[in-house]
Amino acid sequence: MLELRRVSKHYSGIAAVEDVSFSARPGEVTGYLGPNGSGKSTTIKMITGLLERTSGQILFDGRPVDADLIAYKRRMGYVPEEPHLYTHLSGLEYLTMVAQLRELPWRRASERIDGLLRLLSLHEDRHAGIAGYSKGMRQKVLIAGALLHNPDLILLDEPFSGLDVASALVLRSLILQLAARGKTVLFSSHELDTVERISHRVVILHRARLVADDSVEHLRSLMELPTLEAIFSQLAVEQDSDSMARSIADLIDA
Amino acid sequence: MRRLIAALGKTIGDRLPMQFRVLHRQFLLRVIDLEALSIEADIPRFLGQFAGVLIMISFLHAFAVYVAIVQYPWRLEHYLISTMMLVAGLVTVVGWDAIFPDRRDIMVLAPLPIRPTVILIAKVCASATLLGIAILALNTAPALVASLLLGGLHTTAFGFFQVLAAYAIAMLAATLFLYCTVLTVQGIAALLLPRKAFLVFSSILQLGAFALFVSVYFLEPALGTVPELLAPSSRPVLAVSPQFWFTCVFNQLNGTLPPELSWLAIRAWIALSAVVLGAAVSLLLSYLRTMKKTIEAPDLVPGASGLHFTPRRGGLRTAIALFSLRSILRSRQHRVALAFFLAIVFAIGLTCLRRELFTPGHEPVPSDFLISTLMMLSLTVFGLRAVFALPISLKANWLLQLTQLRPTAKYIAATRTTLFAFAAAPVLIVTALLALNYRPWQHIAAHILMLALFGLLFVELALVRFDKVPFTCSWMPGKANVQVIFWGAVFIWIIFGALAGMYEHSALHHPSQFVIMAAVLLAFTAATASYNRARARTATLDFEDQAPELITTLGLLVIPEPRADDISKSKMG
């Protein structure tokens, strides 16, 4: 189980994440929601160890992750928000490098790389440079790299970004299947419909602070609102979207 | 002075169209890849340091002019023009692709109401500005000294100004010739070749030009006197050497050109006119086509057919070695940076080869061969180490941070292996090939053994305080003192290389000396390796270059010691 205890991150005194506590259980999908700039990606980067937290504790299976960061990294897979890859490598070269850096046995790694490339429809372009890949293809490379070592904890930061409908459906199903096999899955997304369909729990962040942490059904009945979108709008959206849109149209029309 | 330049720039700049000014500034700043820089990078300081290196060279040139120009005018003038052309060549090669807008430029600029000619002129002017700075930095001091000394030999009162004008025009013409030659070749290639073939050809041409400029500079014969220049045997060299043509242009404008050499000055003017015209026509014709082709280029280019070398076996060492190799082979920026060092290595190697080819029969190993190969080795190792410090994609480094499953020492060990395999080992092989004509074999074997020991030492020295994976740490130009490093390296390299080579030459004939030399090298290598390994055990991998910690106080805050009477007053109060 992944557990965050009063985790905060401050930049020059400004809180990017403030006093956030929640847990993500194995066998469950935890959706992590929040408007732009609310601190979702910062939280996920702190969970991966890419960012140092200002205060608080992060535990995985009851142990602080920094007690043995290397052992923790071996069990974690991560898809970042932006598809930053070494674009001078081909898809195959990149995944092979990931496998070598992760010290995977070469035969098993080789089978998995080939299999993932085929299943994600990248096999034909495996020798082409990533620089030429579309956003969706890059996202698929990132997903393959995150799953290559069969991790126990899967962190997905806006994993549907750039994927076409068919690939998004596959990924949605894949997330559920991974959770069903006992993995802990934490994923952030702006696609509230998808989050509502596949998440066992949702955690909502607003202005760096946690405002909700519960199952979707419980939140619906508690707030007497029909959808996750309505719940999210009430908890984390401040402005009236219609009036905002009208103001923008008026401004450029003036 | 700085304010004067700024004011002058503002006065000229304000008269130019806004679009041109904005684009020119953007293109000029992009001489350094901004994505590769550290957050704390100081680009103006870095450019200032390089200008400083050129100004230092110019002062050395001024001193050489003061000492020798009256006695050996031709030799010195030829040297100054050759050096200027070398610097201009290097600047041109570094900014090789700067003339044609890249895909990002086109995607940003094409939707905007900007005429392609404005983009072309801004691009050309940005490159020309850099060249202008190089010309000024390198030539101001020697031009003034040469004008004072040679101007004194003129009978008229305007001698100083005549020499100064001749010097300035000759240098400008030589630089313009070189710059326009490169533009012409690029323009014609862009015009004739399909886009994909042009991109491949252009990067090969860029490296070839680099090797050519440096090789010509080092290998061109020194013809120092008028009789030497007039000798029939010199004619073939003079006919194909632009450096001699423009030396004759200087003398023509100065009124000191012998009539027998006037054909060289005429050749210079014809060649200059031809390349200026060629550059203008080929660029204008190819520019629109290139922009169109760049837009039309497919987003996904299929991988090249044929053999794809992606070994699945191996761990960290293989991953880092292959990543390094692919970064060098596929990144233009890194190839060019490495080519700067390899071009000198190539020139030295060519000198050795020429000696071998023109020597009949076998001969003993000469000391200059030992010195040359040692210099080749040091340049390759430290050159590759310098290129390792330039990152390829900072934003993608999260992968290495996230997959760091082993201690830092293992990563540094992998870097060590990579450096030895790609820098030291090839030089050992080339040395063995270049030494085929020398005898006895034992001396060759002993020299290669000694070079291997030097290679190990250089690799260890190159890794002192280098806690990085190659091509992953951001680069902070301006942090290091380029002046000190450059001159220190040049002097140490020359002195150390010469001394080590001469000692080794003697040691090859005296086994006891050889053993002592090998033992000393081993001891130094072991000490450096031990330091590096001890340091690596506690180090963390660097992905962001940091400025050295430095606290500067202005001395404005002074806390006075309390006086005795103040203390007593406060107690009474």
Image (cartoon, rainbow, N blue to C red):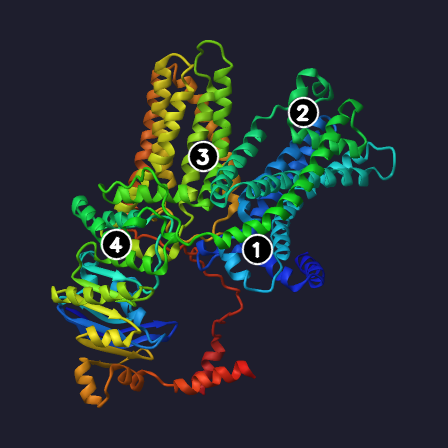
Q: Quadrant of residue A244?
A: bottom left
Both labels 1 and 2 in a single chain: yes
Q: Could you tell me the amino acid type at mark 3?
A: Leu
Q: Could you tell me the amino acid type at mark 4?
A: Thr
In the picture of the structure, the residue carrying the numbered disc 4 is B403
Viewer-proximal residue among B519 and A236: A236
Contact (CB < 8 A) between labels 2 and 3?
A: no
**Label 4: chain?**
B
**Label 3: chain?**
B
> Residue B128: percent from the left, percent from the top?
64, 48
Q: Earlier in the sequence, mark 1 or mark 2?
A: 1
Q: Earlier in the sequence, mark 3 or mark 4?
A: 3
Q: Could you tell me the amino acid type at mark 1?
A: Phe
Q: Earlier in the sequence, mark 4 or mark 1?
A: 1
Give SS at disc 4: loop
Q: CA distance from mark 3 to mark 4?
A: 33 Å
In the picture of the structure, the residue carrying the numbered disc 2 is B239
Q: Could you tell me the amino acid type at mark 2?
A: Ala
